[in-house]
Image (cartoon, rainbow, N blue to C red):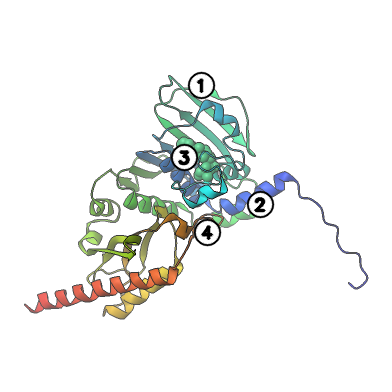
Amino acid sequence: RVGADPPRIRRLEESVVNRIAAGEVIQRPSSAVKELVENSLDAGASTVSVTVKDGGLKLIQVSDDGHGIRFEDLPILCERHTTSKLSTYEDLQTIKSMGFRGEALASMTYVGHVTVTTITEGQLHGYRVSYKDGVMENEPKPCAAVKGTQIMVENLFYNMVARRKTLQNSNDDYPKIVDFISRFAVHHINVNFSCRKHGTNRADVHSASTSSRLDAIRNVYGTSVVRDLMEIEVSDENDGDAVFKMDGYISNANYVAKKITMILFINDRLVDCTSLKRAIEFVYSATLPQASKPFIYMSINLPSEHVDVNIHPTKKEVSLLNQERIIEIIKNTIEEKLRSSNTTRIFQTQA
Ligand code: ADP
Ligand code: MG
């Protein structure tokens, strides 16, 4: 191409930009469900109900009994970068809510049809309004409502042919959705969660608020799992200030599974941490005789300035200060726990 004119650079149309960005934030139906449930939790809900049709491609509906949305905020609710949670960049450092960027609802309106029904405390009726491409499609209509917010997303990815095809061909996303809700139910033990397929009465997750973590795990993962769990806890202090605290439940030598279940919350955010997961799998395979994969529920708390929450478009990963050191401490704690429980078990069988 020597001598050829370089191609012209043009500005993309805003609708194209928005759809591309939306496709990154909402990668699949389960990512929409996660965002919606996190919004419900951010709104202080004590009950969150999820209904799904066609693996979320036809319909996702999340209802909560949280604080609702003000009537006067409805016009900008689904615009990009509108949020009640963050105002200055510095707030990111201390933010407690799971949301902060005001992108989730907007994104859903660029790749699906969104209808919101909401009521705030003290109002006689609620409002219902639909959104498309970031804007309100009509004036909010008064309607009956009890408490909180219901958000309905229909025909997700209707305008992203390739994405829709891939999702239709792959096994549907419903198991992933159930998995997300199960994880939330284990961590947020004071919230009632339910998740069901549209048109069925039977809920696939149904957790009632409890004060016991083990009850919550039993509720979702069953009695046989809970029987083989041990509590773990560790904290690391720096000049008297606890800089890192971890607590949770891990499976013992009797637990048998082909796949690891790793439920990880860091500062109350549901996240993945591949290096921690690998380290834990390694400890189990090196410490226990049978090659069973573990069940892990772990909640890590760090000073918020040690956690960068804004490194991933879906907020799926966070980055931690001193990550290696933290992983090392957790590894050692688990190893110790497994060794001591393993000897106890052998001792018990011999006695
Ligand atoms: P973010 O959560 O990052 O603020 P979202 O697009 O997810 O961005 O939501 C935008 C805003 O809409 C939130 O800041 C919140 O004020 C409001 N909102 C969304 N869902 C709910 C809900 N279920 N209950 C109350 N308010 C909600
Ligand atoms: Mg949000």
The percent coordinates of residue 88 (x first, y second) are 56, 45
Amino acid at circle 2: Ile
Where does label 3 land, which residue?
Answer: 61
Where does label 4 land, which residue?
Answer: 170
Q: For mark 3, does the 10 Å Cα neighbourhood hold few (<14), some (14 to 19), or many (20 or more) residues?
A: many
Q: Are marks 4 and 2 in contact (CB under 8 Å)?
A: no
Q: For mark 4, does the 10 Å Cα neighbourhood hold few (<14), some (14 to 19), or many (20 or more) residues?
A: few
Secondary element type, mark 1:
strand
Secondary element type, mark 4:
loop
Secondary element type, mark 3:
strand
Near-viewer residue (114 or 266)? 266
Disc marking residue 142: 1
Amino acid at circle 1: Pro
From mark 2 to mark 1, how far is it between C-alphas? 34 Å
Nearest to N terminus: mark 2 or mark 1 = 2
From mark 3 to mark 4, how far is it between C-alphas? 22 Å
Disc marking residue 20: 2
